[in-house]
Amino acid sequence: MHVNARKIALSGVLAAFAVVLIVLGSIFETSTLFLLAAAAFCVGIVVREWGIAYGTAFLTACTLLGVIVSPQKMYCVTFAAMGIYLLLAEAGWEALAKAERIQKKKIILWVWKYLVFNSMFLPALYFFPSLLVAKKMTKTLFFVMAAAGQAGIFIFDRAYIYFQAEVWGRLRGKVMKQ
């Protein structure tokens, strides 16, 4: 019983922190993507500590709370997309970790991550270009934005891996101690 109370308490603190970061993204427009990515990293913490199902509930709660609190509702959509990407990337990692006969797991994981990202990003770029670009979407601009998205997800994913290993790795012992 005590362990569940700690889990719920830490999840509540992380949810509050994530929502504060979403709201701060509305205030500091120049740092919006950074702050939304940091908020999504909280989803990654929950997924790695307590699993995909708990992480999905956490992401849902944070997104709904963000919609209620944040003045910029579209930032909640971006946060949710980042969180879904992290959920599916972690699910792919867990599935590959259990598969003993599969070789070249890192390559398969990266292919999986790019499939997940592109299944969300490319339709959004094609069907809702005004959300991402202020001008009229030309074919050239579409391909430039698609290439920029590939570079962006690589940077986001590398930052997430670094965050989990270095930042959360150091904080975990202090926060999670019994």
Image: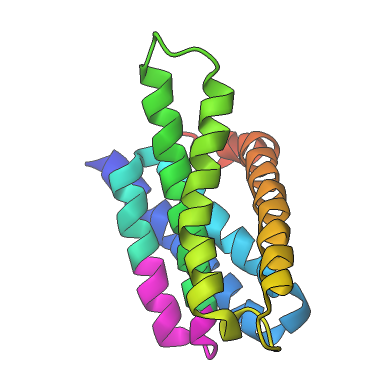
Tell me which corner region of the image, top left, top right, bottom left or bottom right, holds residue 57. bottom left
| Quadrant of the snapshot with the C terminus | top left
Outermost residue, left side: 1
The residue at 60%/67% (across/down) is: 36
| Total numbered labels placed on residues in the image | 0
Bounds of the magenta segment: 61-74
The residue at 71%/57% (across/down) is: 147
As displayed, is residue 89 above or below residue 38?
A: above
Answer yes or no: is residue 42 visible. Answer: no
Report the front residue among 94 and 124.
124
* Prevalent SS, magenta region: helix
- Residue 141: in magenta span: no
Q: Position of residue 87 (x, y in %)?
A: 42, 48
Position of 2 with respect to 121 (left or right) is left
Tell me which corner region of the image, top left, top right, bottom left or bottom right, holds residue 141. bottom right
The residue at 35%/39% (across/down) is: 51
As displayed, is residue 90 above or below residue 75?
A: above
The residue at 63%/84% (across/down) is: 26
Position of 21 with respect to 70 (left or right) is right
- Residue 64: in magenta span: yes
Report the front residue among 122 and 46.
122
Q: Position of residue 62 (x, y in %)?
A: 41, 68
Outermost residue, top side: 101
Position of 114 with respect to 29 (left or right) is left
Report the front residue among 153 and 68.
153
As displayed, is residue 67 above or below residue 172?
A: below
Q: Position of residue 116 (x, y in %)?
A: 47, 49
Answer yes or no: is residue 154 visible. Answer: yes
